[in-house]
Amino acid sequence: MQTSELPDLAHTDTKPLHWLATATAMAAVVAAAGMLQPDPAASASTPHRTTAQHGTAPAAAPDPERATYPLECGGAGNTVAEQQPGDLDGDGRPETVAVVHCAAGSGTPPSGVYVLTGGSGATPRVVATLVDPAEKLSVGDFAVRDGIISATLFGYSSADVPQCCPDQQEKVTWQWRGGAFVRATRSAPGSA
C-alpha cells in the first residue's frame, strides 16, 4: 500500500454531526428554492397557450349537437351541416364553429354560422353569430385553421334567382381581434 503525503482528510471520517449539518444545509436550499417561485397572481395575468400538462387530457371542444341555435325552423328541427373545433381567442380552450340550417326535405335552406363555447360537461352556448340565416346565404368550403375561420358564402342577386342555383359567391374569413370577430373578404382567383 502506498501512503499519501497529504494529511488525512477530515471529511472522510463521517460522524452523526456531519450528517445532521448536511441535512440542515439541504433543507435550507429546498426552502430557499420554494421562496423563489413566481408569484401566482402575477403569472395568472400573463396569458399562456399550454393546453395540457403531463397526465391531463386537453379540453374537449363543445359538441354542436347539444347546442340550441337561434333558428326559426317551424318545428322542422335543425341540422349541423359542418363543424370545426379551434382555439379562436387564444385562451387555450377550444371553441367550435358550426354551420347549421333548418332540416329541409328538399332545396337549399339558408345557413347560419355560429361560434360555441362551453366547458367539459356544460351545455354548449352560442357566443357569436357570424352568418345569420336571415341573410339567405349558404356555406361551402368551410375551415378553421390557426384561429382563422374561412368559408365561401353563396347568395342570390335577386328574388328571381331560383333557390337551387345561387349566383353570387364571396370568400370570407373571421378572426378574433379586440374582443370581436372581424370579417374580411378574400379575393377570388382571377378577380381584379
Image (cartoon, helix red, strand yellow):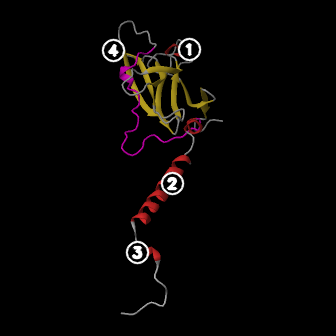
Observer-side mark, 4 or 1, equals: 4
Label 1, secondary structure: give it: loop
The crowd level at tag 2 (other Cα within 10 Å; few <14, some 14-19, many 20+) is few
- The vertical placement of 168 against 150, above or below, is above
Q: Locate residue 28, reporting x and y percent.
A: 51, 54
The amino acid marked with disc number 1 is Ser
Asked where in the image residue 102 lies, by quadrant, the reply is top left
The answer to whether 76 appears left or right of 163 in the picture is: left
Residue at horizontal 47%, vertical 54%? 27
Report the disc number at residue 186.
Answer: none
N-terminal label among 1 and 2:
2
Q: Locate residue 66, reporting x and y percent.
A: 36, 20
What segment is highlighted magenta in the picture?
Answer: 45-69
Asked where in the image residue 79 lies, by quadrant, the reply is top left
Front residue (pair 137, 14): 14
Hey, which residue is sitting farthest right in the picture? 192
**Image quarter hosting the N terminus:** bottom left
Report the disc number at residue 158.
Answer: 1
The amino acid marked with disc number 3 is Asp
Asked where in the image residue 84 lies, by quadrant, the reply is top left
Observer-side mark, 3 or 2, equals: 3
